[in-house]
Image: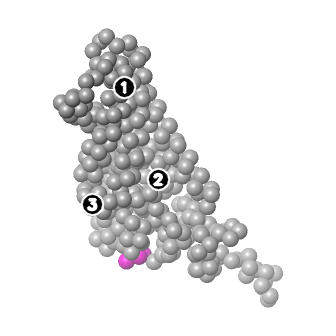
Amino acid sequence: MRDFASLRTDQWLRARAAEVLLALALAPAFAWMNPFFSSKQPFLALVGFWGAVLACWFVTMAIVERLLSAFDFFRRISPVWRRATVIAVAALPMILIAGAGIHALKGWRITPYEIIELYLQIILIGSGVALIAVATFVRRFEPATSGNAMAFSPIMRDWISEESSSPVIRPQDTLSAVNNRLLSRLPLQVRGRILCLEMEDHYVRVHTDRGSALVLLRLSDAIAEAQAATSGRQVHRSWWVADDAIDRFERIGRTGQIHLNGGIKAPVSQRYLRSVESACAPKGADHGKAANAPGAAV
């Protein structure tokens, strides 16, 4: 289990590093456009200001999105309104961050008018930066069965999912979505046979034989929707797997690991170990035991 936790941490750190690099790359352009300042400030000082502010914007968006995901109202609203809400809320703490930097460079009078003006500027610039990030990272987020895309904010991943190339719509995709409510929540390009469900923060990543996508659901709700059309079982507090997607089971000490079609590996916690072993036995999970049993063929 530590290996899976370490992998997720590494993905999160790579994502933050990528966002910081993008912020630093954009800093000279914003320093040249100079939306907040006059031409009196040194260019290098402006580059430092914008690099710090843009990096803070990415981090603030990720934190705000995670906090808001704990509320039911946020889960129920449409993706467009979720994005708007995240940007509007994230802009509030950014007033303090950007305001402090502006005051250090040129002085800033804190008046209601100045605060409102800065807030609106942050929303405008922040939305533009988010769209630039989508255009920059879109290829990195094309659906992949491995599910190992970098751990950007799910809001950003929603944007990228909608910006990705137009899918080829197959008749069976529409029929499957009608028969399976969970599939109907997925982008058309990843609708297919469900392999497993993986919990990520307040979201669930649905892995299919055509890729993966995030949905804003509790894992228990996603399992209920998946099992309405697909036989499967929970193998970990954060994982559910479809029975027909299991390739083989591997025992690792007091825990285990399930190898699924497409190369996905799902951890099996001690709580579910016995039931998983029993279910996987017909698939050859205990082939070694059968071979060594009395009367086994030599």
Residue drawn at point x = 31 percent, y = 74 percent:
179
The chief SS type of the magenta part is: loop
CA distance for labels 1 and 3: 34 Å
What residue is pinned by disc 1?
101
Indicate the quadrant containing the N terminus: top left, top right, bottom left or bottom right. bottom right
Residue drawn at point x = 62 percent, y = 66 percent:
257
Q: Can residue 236 be seen from the camera position used here?
A: yes
Indicate the quadrant containing the C terminus: top left, top right, bottom left or bottom right. bottom right
What residue is pinned by disc 2?
144
- Residue 130: which disc? none
Q: Is residue 188 above or below residue 109?
A: below
Q: In the structure shown, which secondary structural element does the residue marked by tag 1 occupy?
A: helix
Residue 274, image x, y percentages:
62, 79
Residue 153, image x, y percentages:
40, 48
Q: Amino acid at mark 2?
A: Ala
Q: Which residues are magenta?
A: 226-230
Q: Is residue 225 above or below residue 290?
A: above
Left or right: 155 in relation to 200: left
Q: Amino acid at mark 3?
A: Phe
